[in-house]
Image: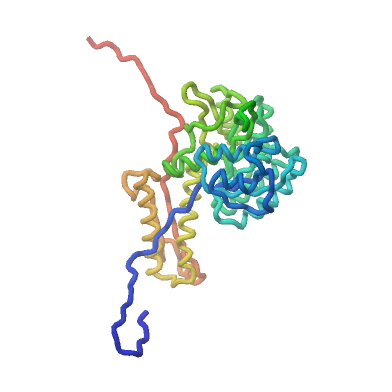
Amino acid sequence: MPQNYTQPGVYIEEISTLPASVIQVPTAIPAFIGLTMKSPGPLFHQITSLSDYQNLFEDDASTSDTPQGYLGISMRLFYANGGGEAYVYSIATNTADVTKELFLSALTDLRNMSEPTLIAFPDAVLLANGQDQVIAAALKQCGELRNRFCIIDVPAADALSSDNRVTALRQLVGDDDLAYGAAYGPWLEVLSASESDSMMIPASAAIAGIYAQVDSTRGVWKAPANVTISGIVGLSQCINNAEQASLNIDPSGAGKSINVISRFIGKGCLVWGARTLAGDDNEWRYVPVRRLFIMIEESIRRATAFVVFEPNDANTWIKVKAMTENFLSDLWRQGALAGAKPAQAFYVNCGLGSTMTPQDILDGRLIINVGLAAIRPAEFIITRFSHKLQEA
């Protein structure tokens, strides 16, 4: 808008020619909840390295994997597998003090934070009862906020050893918001700090590190699977193909998939599954599809905040449509969306008669319709062979 000048002279005005843009939000910033050797207070503390964790939560790094919970040694696997920025909440310093209420209180505090995009609580397996309530609360938070994803551990080192235990595990995760979480097992075998013996720990922190690694090198749309887990010496169980079949696809029809970590000759222990707990859902079956939509939805939500209280007219609609299309075009060029050209990969609609009625305008609603063709992982590679008859 022109300024009111009162004194003769030469004045310079800068005119912005760059349109508003959508910036991709971070996708792999976990919030860890569990036991620590010392507690700097009941808050989520930001860390960016293993040394940050040790300085805040450990008395002596050489004894940090004494069995007072699993979080300390789990953080080593998080950073060994590509982890970076994270938040840590200490609920206690002694296993005897662990209760479901402490986990639920931490989740309540986490609800008010916008930075974390993953939730993991390896020490929830220590709960004699109430682990189902902790998982349900975490999934509910993810489903309501729609900006984070939950990594869930199988409840014991031998949890996949029988059908009864697997059924109990599937009952543990409940029935709601299953698309916002994924379960992983079996547990991982790691060496102690002295390397004189080993211990079994839940896998969630290592998986969070792999999420971060894959997101940074390939993108959130790439399945965090077929990746070797670093820093371990083995697994608590070896799952054969027949056993994995009933874990990957729930034979009961409830769709509660469990992603198996398997050992392969010459490759080590690989994450060999990429399904959410909604394993039978055609839309949200795969972890990368759900997390891609989380990233896109949150990125657009934050970027369009400037539109609040702007005139609800064609000029604003064009700005919003253009910035959203530019963002999605860039994702398509990176390989996040399927289609030979942008028109096949996504659409963005915004306007009167298209996404809004005159009543919507009167009610102050600006409605944007976005459709995406997400890339889905090739889970089953089928190569068909046949004999070719001799022709001469």
Of 61 and 266, which appears nearest the observer? 61
Could one spot residue 127 in this view of the protein? yes
Name the quarter where the C terminus is drawn.
top left
User: Where is residue 344 drawn, in percent x and y?
Assistant: 35, 47
In this picture, residue 190 sits left or right of residue 27: right
| For residue 193, above or below residue 308 | above
The quarter of the picture where the N terminus appears is bottom left
Q: Position of residue 327 (x, y in %)?
A: 39, 55
Q: Position of residue 79 (x, y in %)?
A: 53, 40
Rendered position, 43 above or below 75 = below
In front here: 103 or 12?
A: 12
How many numbered tags mark residues here?
Answer: 0
> Residue drawn at (27%, 11%), measured in percent from left and top?
390
Q: Residue furthest right?
A: 96
Location of residue 207 with respect to 354 vertically, above or below? above
In the image, taking residue 157 as reference, residue 366 lies left or right, namely: left
Residue at left offset 68%, top offset 41%: 124
Farthest residue, direction left: 392
70 above or below 116? above
Horizontal and vertical percent for residue 218? Answer: 42, 41
Residue 279: image quadrant is top right
Residue 148 in sight from this viewpoint: no
Residue at the spot x=44%, y=53% of the render? 24
Task: Work out whether residue 269 or residue 61 is closer to the camera in this orientation and state it.
Answer: 61
Residue furthest to the top? 392
- In this orientation, which residue lies closer to the viewer: 267 or 245? 267
How has the structure been colored for display?
rainbow
